[in-house]
Amino acid sequence: MFTGQYPLARNRRMRSDAWSRSLIQETQLLPQNLIQPLFIVEGQNQRIDIPSLPTVQRYSVDVAVDVAKEAEALGIPCVAIFACVEASDKSEDAQEAWNPNSLACRAIHAIKQACPNLGIMVDVALDLYTTHGHDGLVVNNSVHNDKTIEALIKQGLNYAHAGADALGPSDMMDGRIRGLREALEDDHFYDTKIFSYTAKYASALYGPYREAVGSSGTLAGASKLTYQQDPANLQEALREAQQDIQEGADMLMVKPGTFYLDVIQLLKQTYQMPLLAYQVSGEFAMIQAGSSLGYIDGKRVMLEALLSLKRAGCNGILTYGAIDVAKDF
Ligand code: PBG
């Protein structure tokens, strides 16, 4: 890169007026870049606070439909469904995950009926359905890769039949994209998208989410390091991405977001694939906490965090604040 010499060149000249600042702005954050995750609970007319995730609530299906309509009206293209599965529906083999009448399926179906043009993404992993809270099936104290894929295929097809537009495998098993893709093709779901959690790290930032869906108690401190990536690793994300692209993923995802901007940048520059970032619960909760203590201006920090994800190279962002942010545009 070459730049002129002061005082002939003054970088502040273009910053001196609002119009010239706007002319050279390199990155824009728009409602169309955002995906709103929705936590779903049983019942009617339910809006339940989540203590560790201020401003975020769990909704019953009827309320979630209204919130989805609100998101769509604000220009948000997609919502992501997370079912808070009742303890009595959890099991060792996660069979509720392929129940066509499950809470997740009822939510997908109801939102699709009300908002046929809104994208519906849904997490594909077993953590919401297993008593132990792992994303896969446990055999001899270890999460079994290939048996888990068989279960994920049943789960993914179940959601596709319910009306899901995009499956979001967040389990980090090897070969799960191919398994899901081949099963979708076989069932004629040619346009069902796969938004793969490609580089998902074994992060300490998922705590509030696990509380929100009620999987933290059961996981009892067990780590997901045998399947999620070590936060120390960057190169490994390239191998994960290559595998997901070859197996038929439509978008890749990096998760968490702001602590992993280098991963976002590298994946975008290397593969030029559509890319998502997930601003996870811990990132979101830290901003909310700092804001409510009066240490930071939460609204501005939120916009800055999301903008940094776009600047690093992602096209879309899952954030619990999608609707609130879109309201301010
Ligand atoms: C489950 C899943 C997790 C999140 C999304 N899907 C948690 C985990 O892997 O333990 C975390 C989202 C968040 O923290 O906001 N596979």
Image: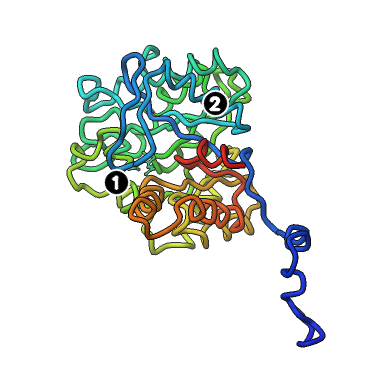
Position above or below: 10 against 303: below
Residue occupied by mark 2: 70
* Relative to 280, 113 lies left or right: right
Position above or below: 167 against 172: above
* Nearer-the-camera pick, 20 or 67: 20
Mark 2 falls on what kind of element?
helix
Can you give x and y, in whole percent of width and height, for residue 158 in the image?
A: 44, 19
Q: Quadrant of ligand 1?
A: top left
Query: Does mark 1's beta carbon lie closer than 8 Å to ligand 1?
Result: yes
* Nearer-the-camera pick, 286 or 294: 294
Instruction: Please state which amino acid type lies under the numbered disc 1.
Output: Gly
Position above or below: 266 against 78: below
Residue drawn at the location 48% of the way across and 15% of the way down: 109
The numbered dot on residue 207 is: 1
Alpha carbon distance from label 2 to label 1: 27 Å
Residue drawn at the location 30% of the way across and 52% of the way down: 225
Q: Quadrant of residue 63?
A: top left
Q: Quadrant of the N terminus?
A: bottom right
Instruction: Please state which amino acid type lies under the numbered disc 2.
Output: Glu
